[in-house]
Amino acid sequence: MNHPNTLRTPDPRQNPTPKSGKTERQHPSPLTTAPAVADNDVTEKILFVTSEMKDFIKAGGLGDVSAALPRALSKNHDIRVLLPGYRAVLTSGAHLKKVGHTRKRGVLPACDIAELVTEDGLHILVVCNDALFNREGSPYVDAHGEGWQDNDVRFATLSSVAADIASGHANLAWRPDLLHLNDWTCALAACYLDWRHETVPSVLTIHNLAYQGVFPESAARRIGLPDKASELDFHGSVSFLRGGMVRADCLTTVSDSYAQQIVGPVYGCGMDRLLARRRNEGRLVGILNGIDPDWNPLHDSALPAPFSIGQWDKRRQNTADLREELGLQAIPGPLFVFVSRMVHQKGLDLVCEAAPQIIAAGGQLALIGRGEPMYERMASMLARRFPGRVSTHIGFDEALAHRMFAGADFLLMPSRYEPCGLSQMYAQAYGCLPIAHATGGLIDTIEDGVSGLLFEHARVCDLRSCLQRAFRIYAEPLLLDAMRGAAMLEKHGWSHSGQQYTSLYRQLCAHKAAA
């Protein structure tokens, strides 16, 4: 996920353990064994709160999840998505109708609430406040890549509006039974509900623990933090995510392996003790992300030669066309791609260090993404060093990413940590074999030697050893095609995960009703 540079983005190996919260709720967990989802006349009303959504604006994987998961959940729930009124939303061409209004709360401004309905019938609620959201740039940073100076107020306002809607103070005809919050940008909603003595249950999904929404202590006044509230305290700063983790009724992460890793100091980003307590209370669970069913190479209009399992000649046509599009030489060796944000987490430096080995062995490399200037320069220099063998595209082009998955032989994902990852699942759906560090959701979605390749440590020597395996597999066409077929047969939809969320929602709502 892309987030502002002004926020704390700690190295998961180096963060200190935080002080224990003084106001954490200690009560029995309602999350016993999840019941099977049964058809009944009860349809829970869910408010899904997010800071980005692929339909309108996307900075990272959260935008994909926020577009796909609510649609999957709409089969069992009356669901609304709450999204800030960014310029991209307001100018999308969708019909916006004012349906509610929230009053000013302290320093947090009043907001209008508008509603739009997507072509497939999903209801979107939009928080309208031009001063906060109607501006150029991404959800989190300006055109120069700098975090908005008022991000604390912007996303505290989003959270406050979500709490107002849940408590019936937004003049809406619709009121949710539960809030599903996503990452630090929405996490304060659980706090506002608690501070206002509301009993609406909340689920907080941690998509990436390294992004915690950390602001100076002076932000406490700007967001209306009660004088005695300590749950946001993080070594003298204010952490939105920590507040949500303390106050939400349940925490989820986007893969089971990541849920296990973050309760320890290596990946816990200074929050491991709090997360371990939540796990021991039965309030931390991992639910694996899925991908949108539109990721289908047989029906993908972005591809020059759509294909399905076994149609390897058509797939090779995509490879040839991709090489021509990217200015790569027509050679018989394998094509490796890197499709990701260019940041430390994603291990781009490891890719660049291993690139000469790929070239020397007869392979090629194509990179696409944007991120930190240092890594963008690193990728661009690689293309200049190896013209015709390395291609770099700074920026992001959704259609080109589809063609890269469809035309490449291997996807490089040497992420130092990866809560879930979506690119490996996109690649598998298109017969591109992921080569990944065995961490987080990459463990849960890649079967080593069957649907991709895994290496143990995020080090260039481990990546190089895995690249040697890849070249050996590429030299055996029958094995390569068998692995491609196995990858394409992997089921990464939202059906199972959606059932898990439905069971979780129903347990929380039933527990609140019985309390």
Image (cartoon, rainbow, N blue to C red):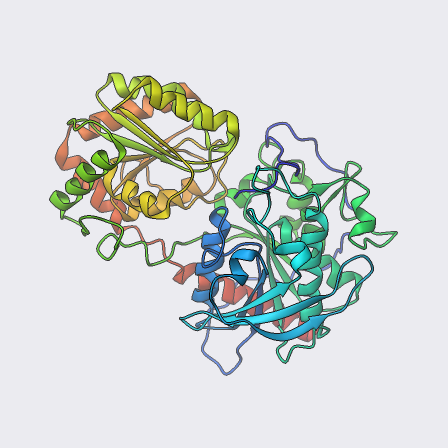
Residue at image coords 50%, 47%: 59
Left or right: 295, with 31 as reference point = left
Farthest residue to the bottom: give it. Answer: 41
Mark yes or no: residue 3 visible: yes
Q: Position of residue 380 (x, y in %)?
A: 40, 25
User: Compared to 134, does 175 lie above or below?
Assistant: below
Residue at image coords 71%, 47%: 150
Q: How many marks?
A: 0
Left or right: 502, with 168 as reference point = left
Farthest residue to the right: give it. Answer: 227
Left or right: 437, with 131 as reference point = left
Left or right: 294, with 420 as reference point = left
Q: Position of residue 271 (x, y in %)?
A: 67, 40
Q: Quadrant of the C terminus?
A: bottom right
Q: Position of residue 157 (x, y in %)?
A: 70, 58
User: Compared to 387, does 419 lie above or below?
Assistant: below
Which of 6/394 is in front? 394
Mark yes or no: residue 457 visible: no
User: Compared to 185, does 265 lie above or below?
Assistant: above
Residue 31 location, quadrant? bottom right
Q: Position of residue 444 (x, y in %)?
A: 41, 44
Residue 435 location, quadrant? top left
Residue at image coords 68%, 75%: 514
